[in-house]
Amino acid sequence: MKLDILAIGAHPDDVELGCGATIAKEISKGRKVGILDLTRGELGTRGSAEIRDEEAANAAKILGVSVRENLAFADGFFVNDKAHKLEIIKIIRRYRPEIVLCNAVDDRHIDHGKGSKLASDACFLSGLRRIETEDIGQMQNEWRPQFVYHYIQWKDLKPDVVVDVSGYMDKKVEAIMAYASQFYDPDSNEPETPISSKNFADSLDYRARNFGRLVGVEHAEGFTVERYPAVDSLFDLK
C-alpha cells in the first residue's frame, strides 16, 4: 500500500495532538494516511502500554487512517542510532509516503525532539540505494519523501506554515479523547499530569483558534519546515 502521508510520533497520541485535524482533512479529500508510533508510551504516569495500544487503535478508527504501526522502541530511552533508523527506513520504504509529519523539533518531553531528529534522519537515509533493507522476505527499493514537516506540541514554537483545519477540530478532539486514560477526566483517580488538566483539554481548541485567528480562519494547525516552502505565485499565499 502506498501512502500519501505518514505521520510519525514518539508516543501514541502525539500525532493526534499535533496534527489530528490536518490528517482528518486530508483523509476527507481521499488521501491515504498512516500513523507510525515509535514507542508504546509505557513510561506514562497514567494508564499502561496495553491500555494505550487499545486507545491508539480506537483513535485510528476515528480518524480513518489506512494503517497504524508501532515499532515498540523503549519509551524514554530510544536513541538515534543505526538500528533505530533502519527500522523506520523499512516503514518508509514499505509505504512510500510523499509527506512525512514528525514530532516537534524542540519540546518539553525529551522523546519528542529525539523522535523528530530520528524520523527526519531516516527520511533522508531511506533515499540512499546503498542502504539495503528487507521487508517480508523481499529487498526494498530506496524511497525519500518529498516533504518533511514537524507539528507543534507542548511548546509554542513559531510555525513556518499553518493549515486551515476549520471544520475538522471535532474529529481531532474525538480522536484525542479516545485516549481516556491520558486526558481530562474529573472522575479519574489517576495522578494528575500536565496533559490531564482541564486547562490542557481547553487548549486544544484555543490554540487552534489562535493560529486560525492569525491567518483569518476559524481553526488552524502549525508546522515547522526543514527547507523553504515554495509557491508558483505570490497569489497562492493566503
Image (cartoon, rainbow, N blue to C red):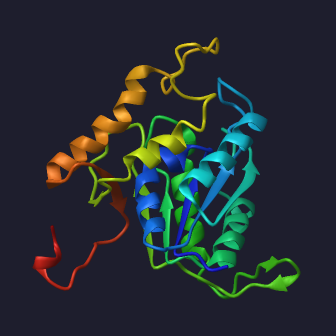
- In this picture, is 50 found above or below 161? above
- In this picture, is 206 found above or below 233? above
**Extreme residue in the left direction:** 235
Query: Residue 222: x and y, percent?
Result: 32, 53
Query: Residue 102: x and y, percent?
Result: 50, 58
Check the picture and name the quadrant holding the N terminus: bottom right
Residue under the image location 57 percent in, 61 percent down: 119
Q: Nearer the viewer, residue 48 or 84?
A: 48
Residue under the image location 61 percent in, 44 percent down: 11
Residue under the image location 74 percent in, 84 percent down: 140
Q: Nearer the viewer, residue 162 or 209?
A: 209
Q: Nearer the viewer, residue 91 or 180?
A: 180
Q: Quadrant of residue 77?
A: top right
Query: Residue 129: x and y, percent?
Result: 66, 88
Residue under the image location 34 percent in, 58 percent down: 224
Q: Is residue 112 visible?
A: no
Check the picture and name the quadrant holding the C terminus: bottom left
Q: Is residue 124 left or right of residue 78?
A: left
Q: How many marks?
A: 0
